[in-house]
Amino acid sequence: HPDANISLVQLDTSNTASVKATALELSRRFHHIDWLYLNAGQMPPSSINWRGFWPLTFANIRHIINTGGRVLQQTDTILDNGLSQVFSTNAFGHYSLVRELEPLTA
């Protein structure tokens, strides 16, 4: 649409203060939000399971490339707010932002 106004906002979805600050900034900048596209994902690998890698390499290399399944060993940390970093980044931060911006989407 030629009259569309697109704004990009960068924030740390694992940090509740960053989510709240971003929601406040967007509330000040806009009176209404038509579309909200949220994209973040984190899976911090700490090591490779070589024992799982070799059998899967010959059986299903596509599965390894697409998912890292049974090969990448994931580590996760607990944040100051008590939530895991992966959950906070991938789910809770998005949920919190949408809930804060809900009045602008009505």
Image (spheres, rainbow, N blue to C red):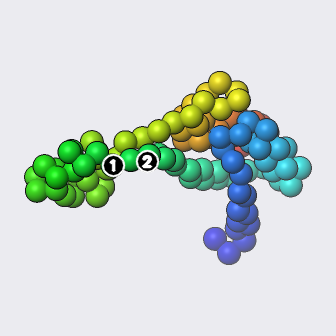
Give the amino acid type for the residue marked by disc 1 in the picture.
Answer: Ile
Report x, y in % for residue 60.
15, 53
SS at mark 1 in the image: strand
Q: From where the camera sits, is residue 31 visible? A: no
Identify which residue, 67 or 48, lies in the foreground: 48
- Image mark for residue 48: 1
Q: Is residue 56 left or right of residue 103?
A: left
Instruction: Tell me which residue sits at (48%, 47%) in the image.
Output: 44
- Give the alpha-carbon distance from disc 2 to disc 1, as whole Å: 8 Å
Instruction: Tell me which residue sits at (25%, 53%) in the image.
Output: 64
View extreme (bottom): residue: 2
Q: Is residue 76 left or right of residue 73?
A: right
View extreme (right): residue: 28
Report x, y in % for residue 24.
85, 44
**Is the residue under label 1 in contact with that under label 2 (CB below 8 Å)?**
yes
**Quadrant in which the C terminus appears:** top right
Q: Is residue 96 left or right of residue 87?
A: right
Report x, y in % for residue 70.
27, 42
Report x, y in % for residue 86.
53, 38
- Image mark for residue 71: none
- Image mark for residue 45: 2
Q: Quadrant of residue 104?
A: top right
Q: Residues within 10 Å of mark 1 (few under 14, many from 20)?
A: some
**Quadrant in which the N terminus appears:** bottom right
Identify which residue, 64 or 102, lies in the foreground: 64
